[in-house]
Amino acid sequence: MAEVPVGKSGGKVFNRVEFKGDLFVDETTTTHFVGSDGTPVKDTDVAPDLDVAYAVEKDGKWSIEYIAGVKIVKNSAAARASADAANQNRLGQAAVEAGGKRFPTATRGGDRVWAEVKSVIGHDETGSEVDLTGKLTWDPAAKTETIGSKGTRGFDTNLPVSKDELDDIIVALWRLAELKKR
C-alpha cells in the first residue's frame, strides 16, 4: 500500500473515488433537473472523482483524512489545472459532508442544481472496486492538496516528473507490455 504522510496510521488509500447520483432543481423537491437532451439527469457524476483519498476505518465507516487532486499538465495549462484540482477537492468534500443529503453544485453548462449522491465507488491499491456508499465521513482536520507535474506553478506540491517525462514512462511501459505478449 502507498504511504501517505498525513493522517492516522492503519488507513487505506483509495483512488478514483466516484460519486454517482441525481440532480434536482432545489434542495427539497422531487423535481429532477432536466438536461439539454430533455431528460431528467439521473445516475450521473454529481462531483468530480477524487484522485487520491486516505481514509481510516472505524465502526464500518471510513473517515477521510486526506484528499489530493492531481493534474499532469504542461506549465502552459497549470493555472487552469490547479483551479480545477482545487474545485475537484472542494466538490468531493461537499459530496462526503452531505452524508446522503443534497448539496449545491453546478452542471458543466453552468446551471445551479442540487446533487444527491446515490452511490460511491472507490478503487483500492489492487485496482478493485470498493463500495463506499454511505460509509464516508469527513474528518474536521482533513487535509486537501493539489498536486501538479514537475515544474508547474500554482499547485500545493509537485510530482518529481514532468508531463513529458511521464508520457515517456507510459510509452516505455506500454512497449514493455507489448514485448511480454510475444
Image (spheres, grey):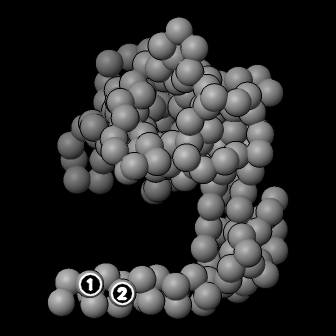
- Residue name at image x 43 percent, y 19 percent: 134
Vertical placement of 176 versus 107: above or below? Answer: below
**Real-space Cα separation, disc 1 to disc 2, in angstroms:** 6 Å
Of the residues shown, which amino acid type is indicated by label 2?
Leu
Q: Which residue is mark 2?
A: 176
Left-right relation of 58 to 38? right
Q: Position of residue 80 (x, y in %)?
A: 68, 70
Q: Is residue 23 visible?
A: no
Q: Nearer the viewer, residue 96 or 131?
A: 131
Of the residues shown, which amino acid type is indicated by label 1?
Lys
Q: Which residue is mark 1?
A: 180
Asked whether the residues under the numbered discs 1 and 2 touch, taking CB atoms below 8 Å apart as contact, a structural biologist would say: yes
Residue at the extreme left: 182
Q: Position of residue 120 (x, y in %)?
A: 40, 33
Vertical placement of 168 versus 45: above or below? Answer: below
- Residue name at image x 77 percent, y 45 percent: 5
Res. 23 mark: none
- Residue name at image x 74 percent, y 51 percent: 145
